[in-house]
Amino acid sequence: MKYYKIVLLKSSAPYLTYYSRQLLKAGSVVSVPLKTTVKEAVVITDVEKPEFETAEITSVSDKYYTNTQMEIAKFVSEYYFSSFGEAISLFLPYCRSGCPLPDNNLQKELSSMHDKNVGERTPRPTLTTPQQKAYTQLLKKDKVLLFGVTGSGKTEIFITLMAKMLEEGKTSIFLMPEISLTPQMEKRLKVYFGDTVAMWHSKLTKKKKESILEGIHSGEVRIVAGARSALFVPLENLGLIVVDEEHDDSYKAMTRPRYHARDAAVLMGKKLRAKVVLASATPSMTSYYKYDIVKLEKPYVVAKKKYKFITGDSISSPILNALYHNYKAKEQSLLFLPTRGNFKYLYCESCGKTLL
């Protein structure tokens, strides 16, 4: 019999010792009895036979965590003051039967596919001269901050980088701060990458997540985009991590472990030798100070700005006329209501009708 130190998944419990009649590797996901229940756990290491009585590991699954996942989880648990069981549970495990092993099997398959398609380029957006310059600079750096003004076309650069990764047989992760941004981004990515891209976030159903994981394990899904949890999907041969709007507070988890996805992405990129691109129009001071910067100083479309100040605190006739003329000219208008945060509805002063 062999004895193993294990940690319960999604638990703050300390290390426990169990025995097994099988030879197990570190990272193996197992089931163990605990009082009257059976819990899922991960094997940490083998140990000498303890002096106290131990229970037997109930079963061994085909799931496992890689050494890199274990190393990052160890850092997260220590840096963010959580248990290892909580930290490793951030990651989605790989699986052995019916799935590629982490010994570069998928990498060989993708390389083979790449060799067969020599000369075929993944569709890419057409970059402007400033975008192309920024893209070229990004290629030279493993860890960089893309400091681009709003509307400068950062997304087109991300897409071009992802296309290059696909051509090299590598995968990509694209992080966004809000789940609400994923539908519109999905449409843009699907135009270029089709079914090779999948959106991942906490609101997905269990069935949808299982479907995406099947695509990841089969090699069909090679780009995963979504909120911070997308960082921990089991992609093989990761070549690129993009953290868009890197300054956003949504990247900071509010439950244990209280990790920051931006910093975890930088650590993961270092461990996996993947390129990490942080991007923002208003970058955090931390990133601005720590990382090399590539700038996009002008918007993709430069529009003329005219300012006209109108007295009053309501939607007046001059405003309505301006909106009407813009509408007739088939142009767009934006109407900002700064009181929305304090007043949950608008009402007509004449008739009293309310608009939510």
Image: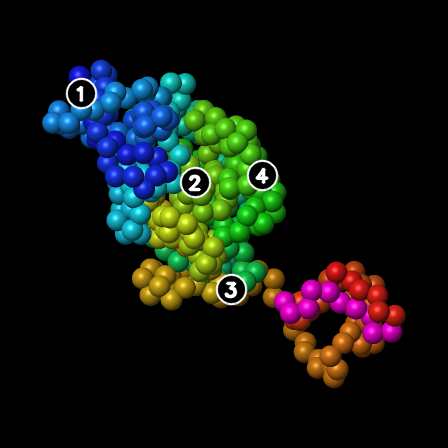
**Residue in the foreground of this view, choosing between 231 and 171:** 231
Q: CA distance from mark 3 to mark 1?
A: 59 Å
Q: Is residue 310 above or below residue 177?
A: below
Q: Residue 2 has which mark?
A: 1
Inspect the image, locate mark 2, and give the three-letter code of the amino acid beneath it: Ser
Residue at 31%, 47% in the rendered image: 82
Q: Identify the amino acid type marked 1.
A: Lys
Amino acid type at image mark 3: Val
- Mark 2, residue position: 172
Q: Could you classify mark 2 by the number of other residues whose Cα lies within 10 Å: few (under 14), some (14-19), or many (20 or more)? A: many
Q: Earlier in the sequence, mark 2 or mark 4?
A: 2
Give the numbered dot on residue 149: 3
- Nearest to the eye among marks 1 and 2: give it: 1
**Dot 1: within a 10 Å radius of its alpha carbon, few (fewer than 14), some, or many (20 or more) residues?**
some
Q: Is 230 on the left or on the right of 143, as rendered?
A: right
Residue drawn at x 71%, y 80% is 308
Task: Specify which label sits upstream in the sequence, 3 or 2.
Answer: 3
Query: Considering the numbered disc 3 on the image, is that residue within a helix, a strand or a loop?
Result: loop
Q: Which residues are magenta?
A: 341-350
Give the x, y percent position of residue 278.
41, 55
Secondary structure at badge 4 equals: helix
